Amino acid sequence: MKSAHTPKSASAVEPRRHSTAAAPLVELDHGEVWTTSLLVADKFGKRHADVLRAVEKLECSPEFSERNFALTSAEVAQPNGGFRAVPMYRITRDGFSFLAMGFTGRAAAAWKEKFIGAFGRMERELRRLAVQKSLPDWQEARQLGKADRRDLTDAVQALCLRAHERGDSSTPLGLWETAATRVVTAALFETGGERITAIRARLTARQLRRLALAEECYARALDSLIDSPAHHRAVNEQGKGAVLAFADATGGREVPGVDPLRRRLGRQSGAAAPALLWWVLAWLIVAVVLLLPAGGA
């Protein structure tokens, strides 16, 4: 007989826009690996409402449900434009295995393999991250990166307040900060539809240092024009230009969490030299970008 239970609510997880076309099969979030009921419905060719009902009718214990299914919501694009909030479950590997037992057929079997493979790869990545984050080199890079992150946040906040005071914009500060984070992350790394926070959480020590320098480029470019008559969009474009120039000059976009072999070998023979070169390059790029006229000035 089916046990009566209600899966836990993930109220701490903020609703976000969800695209099954762009999203990876599984995600790493706050140290846990999840898929979603929206992805399960999409890949297995089922109505999402039917998958939600299937989760709620699973004959599992309340304890199993509590551990493996978290009720949250997502904003889904509508055919006529705009977004609509819909309920969604985040599902662990064990929860997926339990739920997918009821899906039959050759196509369903193929997707089961793909999901299980994706869970396995992400769980291995989680173990790698645990080892990486225990290393002094990574911890130092993380702390230095936080300082540069604060500098960028302060610069973005100053530009936002300036725009508000001039009546040029009413966009909330949080959206300005999110946009700046996306600009820097997308310039340096292959995102593949993955959440920005998840990407940043698995960067190597070298990638954290590179990210910090890119954010410093952005912050310095904004700071240098904050007192100019230029429109905030023109100031922001100068900042973006500095970040993109830095990204191009230091190797372009790369895979998060992966250090190419030649870079790993280079780090073993002396990490200070590449870091110093990047620092000098970052300041040269900011200087060059600032020599360019700010559009709309």
Image (cartoon, rainbow, N blue to C red):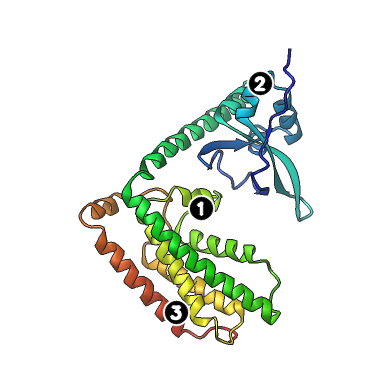
Q: Which amino acid is tagged 3? A: Val
Residue 86 coordinates in the image, percent (x, y): 75, 43
Rendered view: 89 above or below 198: above
Comes first in the chain, label 2 or label 1: 2
| Observer able to see residue 107 | no
Q: Which amino acid is tagged 1? A: Thr
Q: Give the secondary structure at mark 3.
A: helix
Residue 242 coordinates in the image, percent (x, y): 46, 73
Residue 289's label in the rendered image is 3
Residue 102's label in the rendered image is 2
Q: CA distance from mark 2 to mark 3?
A: 58 Å
| Observer able to see residue 210 | yes
Residue 91 is drawn in which quadrant?
A: top right
Q: Which residue is mark 1?
A: 191
Residue nearest the viewer, comparing 164 with 249? 164
Rendered view: 24 above or below 264: above
Residue 82 coordinates in the image, percent (x, y): 76, 55
